Image (cartoon, rainbow, N blue to C red):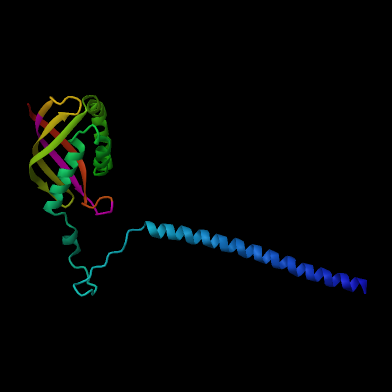
Amino acid sequence: MKEKTQRKYYEVWGDTLNLLYFLRTLVIILSALCIYLTILLKKASDKPPILIKVDSIGQTQAIKDWQSQTAVTEPEVVNFTTTFIEYFTGYDFYTSDNNFKKAFKMMTLQYQKKADEFLQSNRIVESINEAQYKTKVNISKIEVLKDTPQNLILKIKGYREQKSYLNPDFYKEIIFEGELVLSKIKRTLDSPWGLLVDNYSETIIKEK
């Protein structure tokens, strides 16, 4: 009788222990599932939104002539060129660091290295900090020299008005001509223009 009672007590304890093991395993599995779903949600949130073209009454439309719709337009070229020249050559004591970062994002990787060498060898950043420049870029003409499916070569004419935060009497006008080589690329969130600067060279015509 005593042996039978001990066996029943052992069986009841064993069932409870098994249940605890099962619940522990279930908690581990559910925790792993939550972590996995969190990772999937994070990746999904990083993706750009899907855009669907609709007509005036909300009906979806098929996209036709995709190449012509993604081709770089003249206003985009002018806007891109003007923006880049202002960021890269519009030296300003307070904003140049941020402007250079923006300008480098508009370059190809190859030209980023070349542009960085140019800034360092000519001590551009040091000169800006020493003189505390404030520069306004004025572009008077943008001319297309060559247009291919891969590249655009532009001739740029303009002048820069250079002043100084440090010396209110300082003023210099720099007349320049530049040649800008642009690579046509696939549009992305980082490159909405569909263009990147592959090279920029500049000649100073006159300083006064």
Q: Which residues are magenta?
A: 173-189
Q: Where 135 falls versus 153 (above or below)? A: above
Q: Would you say the magenta stretch is mainly helix, strand or loop?
A: strand
Q: Is residue 187 magenta?
A: yes
In which quadrant of the rendered view does residue 18 lie? bottom right
Q: Quadrant of the N terminus?
A: bottom right
Residue plotted at (20% across, 72% down): 55
Q: Quadrant of the C terminus?
A: top left
Q: Where 23 falls versus 130 (above or below)? A: below
Q: Position of residue 87 (x, y in %)?
A: 20, 39
Q: Position of residue 194 (x, y in %)?
A: 21, 52
Question: In the shown orientation, is residue 68 left or right of residue 44?
Answer: left
Q: Position of residue 204 (x, y in %)?
A: 10, 30
Nearer to the camera, 55 or 109: 55
Q: Position of residue 108 (x, y in %)?
A: 25, 43
Q: Where 37 falls versus 176 (above or below)? A: below
